[in-house]
Every structure is written in structure tokens, then in C-alpha cells.
Image (cartoon, rainbow, N blue to C red):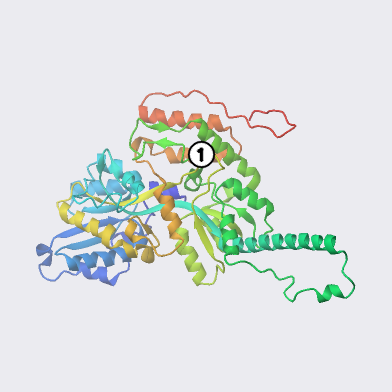
Amino acid sequence: MKLWKKVLAVAAVVAAAGVLAVIGVGSDRLAGLVEIPGNALTIRPTVNLWYTDEALGDYLARVALDFSEEQDVRVIPKLVSGLEYLENINRESLDTNTYPDLYIIGNESLEKAWLGGLASDIRDADGLVGTGNFPEAAIHAVTCRGHVIGYPFYYETSALIYNETYLEEAARVALEVEADALAGEEAMRELEENGEPVEGEQEENIPPDAGEVIYEDGAVEERMQGLIPASVEEIRAFADGYNAPEQVEAVFKWDVSDIFYNYFFVGNYINVGGPTGDDPGKIDIYNLDVIRCLLSYQNLNQFFSIEAQEVDYDSVVQEFIDGKLVFTVATSDILSKLEQAQADGQFPYEYGVAKVPDIDGELETKSLSVTNAVVVNGYSQNKDLANAFARYLVEEASSELFERTGKIPVALNAAPSLPQAKAFNEEYADSVPIPKMVQTSNYWVQMEIAFTRIWTGGEVSETLKNLSEQIKTQVAGTPVTEEYIPAPVEEPEEGQEFLED
């Protein structure tokens, strides 16, 4: 399933109906929470937590029990379906006593939750949710209509993944080529200065380590770091000169069919809703920089030849694990997959993570991000306790989140020890939070359609113009017409005439 579809569905759908009736997932400790001796239920207050991602089950069970043991309160996590998540919370809140006091949800749904009365201001007198504890992107993500209505929990964004083993070997080869060239130049100088050696002297003068390349300390590492691309232009240059191992099928491949892995091409120059993604007066999709970015994106199809109809994220990740790719763009879920594949012996390589590359020396990129937040239900009768547990979850208990679930926590003091996670944290801190305006909820579907059309040769400016008009019309409620922006003219190589795109 495409990542944006998972986002719009809030989380993966729980298919088995029986699972929905179970509180949590497979945890003996959580089962113990349900067993309430005597009249304990009337003595100890209960806080209900809803979540939709099955991977969080055992982790939330442990954290809930730890908190319950420390405080005079019972916290009951409940796994529910992601389908009509907010609608179900709203119905339960109005009609029953089984509604959640707090729940976990992606920031793209926060405006809908706020407008429906299902979210309340966090109780944060000491300023926990501030830049000292969370990246600014996280604070923007949980802010709606000027209110901070969620505690940032964990995030998803994309970054550049590379096969470090391949880059290290490429660095060695480059150093050896340079050493051979220097040796050749030295031999020529020797020949010019001293003439041909006397027969028999040539072998006597050859040192015992001749032909062995001796590297200075750190030379290979330094050269390898220089091969990590800062731009897509550098990836193309690397591909042109790379003598790939037999198993490598592509230097660079990513899921061009999913907007989440494409959005970084335009993220730095598109504005949908301002910094907090909820301002209808700030919509800027159609501009010259975005056109230039997408012209570069379109040209990559001719170079990397990726068929949008034949590629998907899971297959790309598997190709990377199989050693068929040097570079790809992936979300942070790949970290746990690669670590497991290494442990199982299915991935006999080292790998690294870097920020997504810029397009070239002028056009910069910026990834999209989704922040999953813990939100206190506006209808809860236990807001103080719900806020207390939410704080505990994101502040004190998130240090083990990655180890237990593979999800990277937002809190700065809970960064995973895995070195490759650092680049994801840096990417997230500089990312564009997914907008939360209700009027633009179909923006991702339409943007993905536009990307696919452009990738397969569609006219860039006209495609963007149509998209911008549609989104602005939805937000304004009246038809909006954009003035056509001609695509920039590429400067021809010497000897060629100027040709318009």
C-alpha cells in the first residue's frame, strides 16, 4: 500500500474482526491490566488509550503498566481499526462511556479532530513541547489554529540510503587508479632523466612492495565520504563512471509511484498552509522553482528508466537488501528491516543514511514528514490524567521506542543509538510537516497523479497549473484561474540552437 494511503487511513487496517475486541496485542502484562480484583475499578480511575498501529502493541502495554504501577491510575491501551478512526472516536465519545481519553494519530488529521471537538490544548505549563525538547518541525506539526493540541510521539520521513560497502570499494578503486597514474608519471620521469635501465638492473631495483597500494590513514574513508552524493546531479555523475559489480542492476532507484518518496523534489518550494499547515491563505504550488524542479525530475526518467507502473516501495527495499542498488530513497522503517536482514545473513553489506540529495547546485530539496502525536480527547473527563500519561509516553518512555517497534521517537533526548538513525533525525528536523487543512485532504492524491503524469512525459507547467487551480478552488470555495508560467528554456550546448521545452 502506498504510504500516503496509509497516512490518510491514519494507520494500517486491522483485518481480523476478533483482533478489534482485544485490548492491545499479545502481551501478558497488558492482560493483567484487565484483571481487576474486587471493586478496584471504582477506586482507581481509568484512562483509555486508542491506537491503530499493531506494531505498538507490546510497547504500549509495557509503558501503560509501568505508569499504572507508578501512579494511582489504570491505563488501558486498545488497538482499533484505522478505518474511520476519528468518526469512531466521535461516535463513541457522544454515545458511550467507552471512548478514548487519548489517542495516537497523524498530524494531518489534527484540524479535523480540533474542529470536531476531539482534541484539546495540551496542559504544558512547564513548556515540555518546546524547541529544547523537540525539533521545530514537530511543534509545527502538532499546532493547529494557534493551539498546541498534541504531544509529538514518533515520525516518518524519507532519506537517502546507500550501500556503504559498494562506496568503500569504489573509493579503493579510485585511489588505486590515482596511485597507478602517479606511478606511471614517476616511471616516465625516471626514464626521461636516466634513460633505459641496464638489463638485469630493472629487477634488482624493484622494491619488494612494488605494486602494493599503501593508503594513508583514513584515505579510503575520506574518499568514500566524498562519494556520498549531495545532489542528484552527483548521483548521475557517479553512475556515469561507476564500474558496478555484477549483482548491481541500478545505481539509483526509488518508488516513483508514491508521492511520499517523490515529494522532496518540490518540498522546498511548495507552500500548503504555511509552517503549521493550517493557513488557507498560504497556498503556493505553481511557481517557477517548482517547474524547474519537476523538469529535472522528468529528465531523470530518461537516465534511470524506472517504470512507474512496475515499481513499488517494498520491491525497491528488497532490491536494496539483495545488493542490486547502490542508492535509494526510503522511510525510516527500512532501518529495522536492514538490521534484521544483516542479522539473518540476507544483507552481507554495510549501509549508510544521508539527507535526501539536492537536485543540483541551485535547486534544493526538502522531505515531507508525518508526525504521530498523542492527543487528549476534548470529551475526556480525565484530562489531567490523560495529559500526564501522554507526557510520560513521549518524554520518559520513548527512549526504547525504536528498539521495540522500529519507530523513531520525536523527543530529542530519545534519539536511537543506531548511527544511521541520526540522518533521519536531521532530515526530519528540516522537513515539511504534512498539511492538516481539511480542504486539502485530497492534495496528495492529486499531487501523485501530477508526478506520474510528469514522469511519463506530461507537460510540466500545464500539469502544475491545473493542480494549483483545483486546490485553490477547493480552499477558496470559488473558481481560481492561474496565469500560465512558461517553462524555462534550457541553454543549449555549444553549436546547438536554443530550443524551447
Q: Position of residue 386 (x, y in %)?
A: 20, 55
| Secondary element at tag 1 | helix
Q: Can you give x and y, in whole percent of width and height, for residue 31 in the image?
A: 25, 69
Residue at the image position 50 percent from the left and 47 percent from the top? 258
The quadrant of the image that shows the C terminus is top right
- How many marks on residues? 1
Residue at image location 20% in from the left, 50% down from the top? 124
Q: Which residue lies furthest to the front in this view?
A: 193
Q: Is residue 424 left or right of residue 24?
A: right
- Confirm whether residue 186 shows in the render: yes
User: Residue 477 or 371: which is nearer the viewer?
Assistant: 371
Rendered residue at 20%/51% (across/down): 126
The image quarter containing residue 202 is bottom right
Classify 460 as above or below 154: above
Task: Judge whether residue 18 can be spotted in this image.
Answer: no
Q: Where is residue 433 in the image (x, y as percent from the top left)?
A: 38, 44
Decide which of 441, 260 is in the foreground and name it.
Answer: 260
Is 335 left or right of 249, judged from the image as shown?
left
Q: Check disc 1 and report the residue beneath it.
A: 449
Few, some or many C-alpha atoms within 10 Å of disc 1 (few <14, some 14-19, many ≥20)?
some
Residue occupying the far right of the picture: 199
Q: Is residue 411 above or below residue 435?
A: below
In the figure, 429 relative to 165: above or below? above
Looking at the rendered structure, the kind of residue marked 1 is Ile
Can you tell which quarter of the image residue 175 is in?
A: bottom right
Question: How far across and down, in percent of the image, does residue 232 sit?
Answer: 58, 47
Residue at figure coordinates x 33%, y 34% from the top left: 279
In the rendered structure, the answer to whether residue 164 lies left or right of residue 198 reads: left
